[in-house]
């Protein structure tokens, strides 16, 4: 995902993360498990992909961090 590129296409990882977050706030492991469930086991997202994508998504303003504990 290019930085500050309007209307840039979403990567598959970003799309799956957004879908996982569309119903409720989740932590990293919860996102990974929801992606696996939503994809019926076809997508197994590792921590490097997940946290790299989350960092870029936060930077791009697509998502924000929750202050809930």
Image: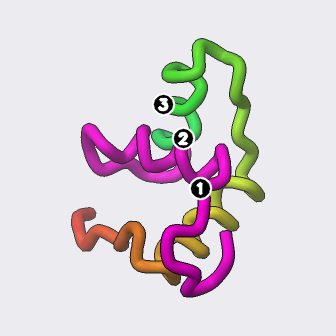
Q: Position of residue 1 (x, y in %)?
A: 67, 69
The structure residue drawn at horizontal position 58% and vertical position 81%, both measured from the top left corner, is: 5
Residue 21 located within the stretch drawn in magenta: yes
The structure residue drawn at horizontal position 50% and vertical position 78%, both measured from the top left corner, is: 6
**Tag in front: 1 or 2:** 1
Q: Position of residue 9 (x, y in %)?
A: 60, 59
Which residue lies most toward the top here? Answer: 40
Residue 40 located within the stretch drawn in magenta: no
Crowd around label 2: few <14 · some 14–19 · many ≥20 (10 Å): many
Q: Along the horizontal axis of the image, is 48 left or right of 51?
A: right
Q: Along the horizontal axis of the image, is 33 left or right of 13?
A: left
The structure residue drawn at horizontal position 58% and vertical position 68%, both measured from the top left corner, is: 8
The residue stretch that appears in magenta: 1-29
Q: Which residue is mark 3?
A: 34
Crowd around label 3: few <14 · some 14–19 · many ≥20 (10 Å): some
Crowd around label 1: few <14 · some 14–19 · many ≥20 (10 Å): few
- Considering only order in the chain, which callout, 2 or 1, is on the residue closer to the N terminus? 1
Q: Which mark is residue 10?
A: 1
Number of numbered callouts drawn: 3
- Considering only order in the chain, which callout, 3 or 1, is on the residue closer to the N terminus? 1
Q: CA distance from mark 1 to mark 2?
A: 10 Å
Q: Are marks 3 and 2 in contact (CB under 8 Å)?
A: no
Q: Which residue is mark 2?
A: 16
- Considering only order in the chain, which callout, 2 or 3, is on the residue closer to the N terminus? 2
SS under mark 3? helix
**Tag in front: 1 or 3:** 1
Vertical comparison of 38 with 48: above or below: above
SS under mark 1? loop
């Amino acid at each position: 995902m290019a930085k500050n590129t309007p209307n840039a296409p979403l990567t598959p990882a970003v799309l799956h993360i957004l879908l996982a977050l569309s119903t409720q706030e989740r932590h990293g492991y919860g996102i990974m498990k929801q992606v696996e469930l939503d994809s019926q086991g076809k997508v197994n997202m590792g921590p490097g992909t997940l946290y790299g994508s989350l960092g870029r998504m936060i930077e791009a303003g697509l998502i924000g961090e929750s202050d809930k504990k």
